[in-house]
Amino acid sequence: MATNNYWQKEIETMKRPELEALQLERLKYIVNYCYERVPFYRNRFDEIGLKPGDIRSFRDVEKIPFTTKDDIRDNYPFGLFAVPRKQIVRMHASSGTTGKPTVVGYTRNDLETWSDLVARLCVAAGANDEDIAQISFGYGLFTGALGLHYGLEKIGASVVPASSGNTEKQVMLIKDFGATLLIATPSYALHIGEVARDMGYTPDDLKLRLGLFGSEGCTEEMRDAVEESLGIFATDNYGMSELMGPGVSGDCEFRTGMHIAEDHFYPEIIDRNTLKPLGEGEIGELAITTLTKEGFPLLRYRTKDITKINYTPDCPCGRTGARMAKIMGRSDDMFKIKGVNVFPSQIESVLVTTPHIGPQYQLILTRTGFMDNIEVVVEVVDGSLLERYSELEKLENNIRHRLQTVLGLDCKITLKEPRSIERTAGKAKRVIDLRNKGTI
Ligand code: DLL
């Protein structure tokens, strides 16, 4: 059992009544802070006759209207900042697929908190000052690379800011520098493993021992595949630019759920349709109130990420913070085919555990007349199988049957050559929705 494995032990192992008292005090402060400093919040409150003083308990949080990504966009670029621009010492942005990005700003204190929270999750996952940490997230407006960078420097690890792309060079650096930690999206880590194999390395030739992965969904089955391909122990951590970046929650070495930094974030799970808070353990959308951010505080921000929260403080690591389950999907990613709600992660779990096919996949959604169709594209491990028609058909039928059992849906299966699905160095694009781009 790990006993010294904390970055800020007194906070990470705080008893719940103490933690809740701290949260409530910070909650009241931040509500007032937003009201006083951000016209958007003042107007929102005034419209419904809500005063900051009305928020006296956690139950009162329900009275506060939600903040959404559209609200941030409508106030582009700096409209929701709570301090004069002069006090903002860093900006990041999340790349929207359409339109303007959402811009976030940090004061000097915010950066300090951010690196502490990332340091916490790195230590919790098992990183230490002996480690050589290769960061294979793209550096830039994306929060992943610089977020992990400062946290890992803070714990004293040797940081290699490799950035993403040029995968052969990534492998060379891992090998030559003796990197022990890899920081990437799980899909990119999988690709790094693939390229390392092409270059003639087995996991034993590399010193990698631990992966700090995040920024995109990854089922446990996919995690197993990444671990095997690189010979590492893989941990998951969660965050988003609007809330800070990485640092909101992360796995400890027991992987019993991602410990939420509750002293800085007040989480709620809400029903996506009624927007009412759900009970402990119920699955719904995560909404977060930032409790300490100065530059860009957010009240009840709807993340669109689907998960559940466990408040029982029984993790063997000793951390008492609530734990959130792996993200099951974004409500944006969920699609409906023939009346069935599908998360890509359900399909991923099936594919990654099916023999003879690789873990990379794409889901192509099309429409014929009024009928939606789903095509699941996967690669065979052995390209010569594509010429052995009866085996190929057997494999296709096996995949179709397994998906039918899990989803209750008939999917078209397309098996492709190894390496024919495009690899990305950041978040993988798994779903290609062509349904509104003309019918077939
Ligand atoms: O991806 C922040 C981050 C960077 C987290 C590095 C962890 C590691 P954004 O680019 O704003 O920020 O994207 C946020 O990514 O709403 C989730 O849908 C997804 N996401 C982030 N972490 C995870 C995770 C960063 N561990 C969006 N599992 C979020 C599943 C994740 N999805």
Image (tube, rainbow, N blue to C red):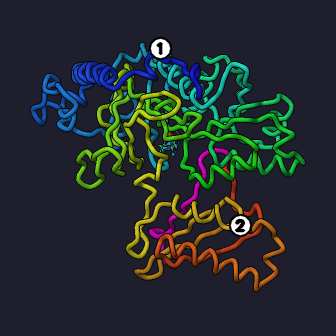
**What residue is pinned by disc 2?**
357
Lateral position of residue 108 relative to residue 286, left or right: right
Q: Which residue is at the front of the view, 322 or 157? A: 322
Local SS, label 2 = strand
Q: Is residue 402 above or below residue 136?
A: below
Q: Which residue is at the front of the view, 405 or 214? A: 405
Question: What secondary structure prevails in the magenta region?
Answer: loop
Which quarter of the rendering shows the N terminus? top right
**What residue is pinned by disc 1?**
108
- Tell me, yes or no, whether the highlighted magenta stretch contains residue 122: no
Query: What residue occupies the far left of the structure in this picture?
Result: 49
Q: Tell me what residue is drawn at x 50 percent, y 17 percent.
A: 8
Q: Tell me what residue is drawn at x 62 percent, y 36 percent.
A: 212
Q: Which residue is at the front of the view, 68 or 14? A: 14
Q: Position of residue 160 (x, y in %)?
A: 73, 26
Q: Position of residue 227 (x, y in %)?
A: 70, 46
Mark 2 to mark 1 CA distance (whole Å)? 48 Å
Q: Amino acid at mark 2?
A: Ile
Q: Tell me what residue is drawn at x 84 percent, y 41 percent.
A: 204
Asked if residue 39 shows in the view, the reply is yes
Query: What residue occupies the far front of the structure in this picture?
Result: 1
Dot 1, how many residues are within 10 Å of its Cα: few (below 14), some (14-19), or many (20+)? some
The magenta segment is 425-440
Q: Position of residue 152 (x, y in %)?
A: 63, 23
Lateral position of residue 203 relative to residue 366, left or right: right
Depth check, mark 2 against mark 1: the one in front is 2
Residue 296, image quadrant: top left
In the rendered structure, find residue 152 and report the number of the disc placed on it: none
